[in-house]
């Protein structure tokens, strides 16, 4: 709707970064705001000691199906891009030259 503020600019919801990780989420804004998706990934890493991949997967799996995807990077450079939608445009490149560009789940996603 015109004039609507989405989830992305809301710190803790669609975007979050601290000394542990950085997260950017996309999907259904209301769900992302209610679930504080970005902050929850960081909190699971910081307070429960989860890896970025485990924390990001847990948060995405905890939201209603078809509502969220995210791209996250840890302070160590680990990248996670889970989603619970049919597909999500996503890409990343690492310092060592590795890159990934995808839309659909791949066999390694466990989907």
Image: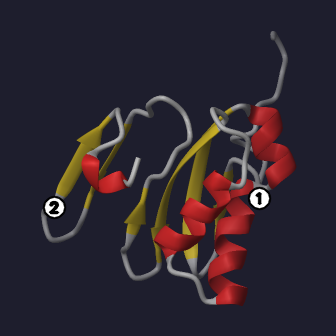
Q: Nearer the viewer, residue 104 or 1?
A: 104
Query: At which x and y percent is residue 35?
Result: 81, 52
74 or 109: which is nearer to us? 109
33 horizontally vs 57: left or right? right
Q: Which mark is residue 96?
A: none
Residue matched to label 2: 98
Task: Find residue 22 and report its image quarter.
Answer: bottom right
Across and down, in percent, residue 55 comes to 59, 70
Question: Left or right: where does residue 98 sit relative to residue 13?
Answer: left
User: Disc 2 versus disc 1: distance between alpha carbons?
Assistant: 29 Å
Question: Quick one: label 1, few (<14), some, or many (20+) residues within 10 Å?
Answer: many
| Image quadrant occupied by the N terminus | top right
Q: Which residue is mark 1?
A: 12
Residue 101 location, x and y as percent?
25, 41
Which residue is found at the position 44% from the left and 34% from the top?
88
- Furthest residue in direction top, as rendered: 2
For image coordinates 47% across by 69% down, the residue present is: 53
**96 above or below 63?**
below
């Amino acid at each position: 709707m015109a004039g609507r503020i989405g989830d992305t600019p809301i710190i803790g919801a669609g975007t979050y970064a601290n000394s542990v990780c950085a997260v950017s989420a996309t999907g259904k804004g209301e769900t992302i705001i209610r679930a504080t998706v970005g902050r929850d990934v960081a909190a699971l890493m910081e307070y429960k000691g989860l890896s970025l991949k485990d924390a990001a997967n847990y948060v995405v799996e905890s939201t209603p199906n078809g509502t969220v995807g995210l791209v996250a990077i840890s302070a160590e450079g680990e990248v996670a891009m889970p989603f619970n939608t049919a597909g999500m445009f996503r890409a990343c490149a690492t310092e060592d030259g590795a890159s990934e560009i995808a839309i659909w789940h791949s066999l390694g996603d466990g989907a």
